[in-house]
Amino acid sequence: MRGLTGVFLLLCALNASALTLSMPPPGEDIVGELVTVRIASYSDTLPVYAEHYSVGFREIVAANPGVNPWVPGEGREIVLPVEFILPPGNRVGIVINLAELRIYYYQPDGQTVVTYPIGIGREGWETPLVSTTVLSTIKNPTWVPPPSIRAEHAAAGDPLPSVVPPGPDNPLGGWAVQLGAKGYFIHGTNKDLGVGMRVSHGCMRMYNGDVEEFAQLVKRGTPVRIINAPVKAGWKGGSLYVEVHDALEEQRAIQVPEADVADAIHMALRVNSVDVNWVQAKAAAVHRSGLPVRVSTESIAIR
């Protein structure tokens, strides 16, 4: 991990909201770098740091086990999980990994990737696994809640109007990116804590600062691929790493993290051959920190 001076310079360069990271060299898969900071004030919470540095709630909690997210404590050193194994598949357009609660937007020049945390659909309102495209971007969107959502709110004693105009009460926030999958948007929010959690009716929520930037970067027709990959494996400097996230709640009864990690490692070994520390690999599966963990015992020259 970087020292605090390096952290300060990196985070100043990120300007709080954006994580724009250089693409890795050919044959490698990891972007960013883990950094640490100290909690500046007793009144600070982990969600404050999460939003400031474009990290989701679950991400920052998983990366800092044992730390109370609401009272981490002044002077407490915390990890900012801003190092990522890129999702599997083609590095083109927008890739959304539901298990990771994160979106990756590969820039057209192929030199950088912009990544943001997102909130996704809760159980019963799951965000779909689809391949689609960006249809349009909308500033100050109006929300027309569908009958199913209005019925749910009415049953809970919280009736919704038929139309919610732009403003602080609009759950779409200040910007929305409309997808070709009918009824689905990537949008802002009026509840920041929902970013990095499963709280929506299927759409993807972003911090308002993030979505404003994102909406002005993406173009109509940009491909969008929504996947669910709780385990990723990748190479950096000739070493093999795995990154393990909790499976989505409705899949935990059938998901076996140790088996998924083993499968990901065996797939990566088809590209390069290294000796694997299987004890470290199992520990990564058990802890599910969401951080890239080195599992090879050696480094090799990447082919």
Image: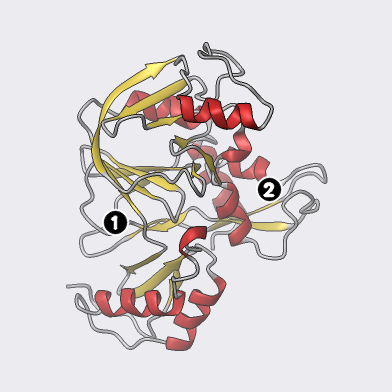
Tell me what residue is drawn at x 24 percent, y 83 percent: 273
**Residue matched to label 1:** 24
Check residue 157 in the rendering and tell me which mark sits there, or answer none.
none
Write down the quadrant of residue 270 in the picture: bottom left
Amino acid type at mark 1: Pro
Q: Secondary structure at mark 1?
A: loop
**Residue matched to label 2:** 46
Q: Please tell me which residue lies in front, 252 or 41.
A: 252
Q: Position of residue 199 (x, y in %)?
A: 56, 41
Tell me what residue is drawn at x 73 percent, y 45 percent: 45
Question: Is the Cβ of the residue at disc 1 closer than 8 Å to that at disc 2?
Answer: no
Tell me what residue is drawn at x 68 percent, y 48 percent: 46
Work out whether 176 lies above or below 235. above
Task: State which quarter of the image contains the N terminus.
Answer: bottom right
Q: Position of residue 185 (x, y in %)?
A: 38, 30
Tell whether 111 sits left or right of 39: left
Work out whether 203 lies above or below 5. above
Task: State which quarter of the image contains the C terminus.
Answer: bottom left
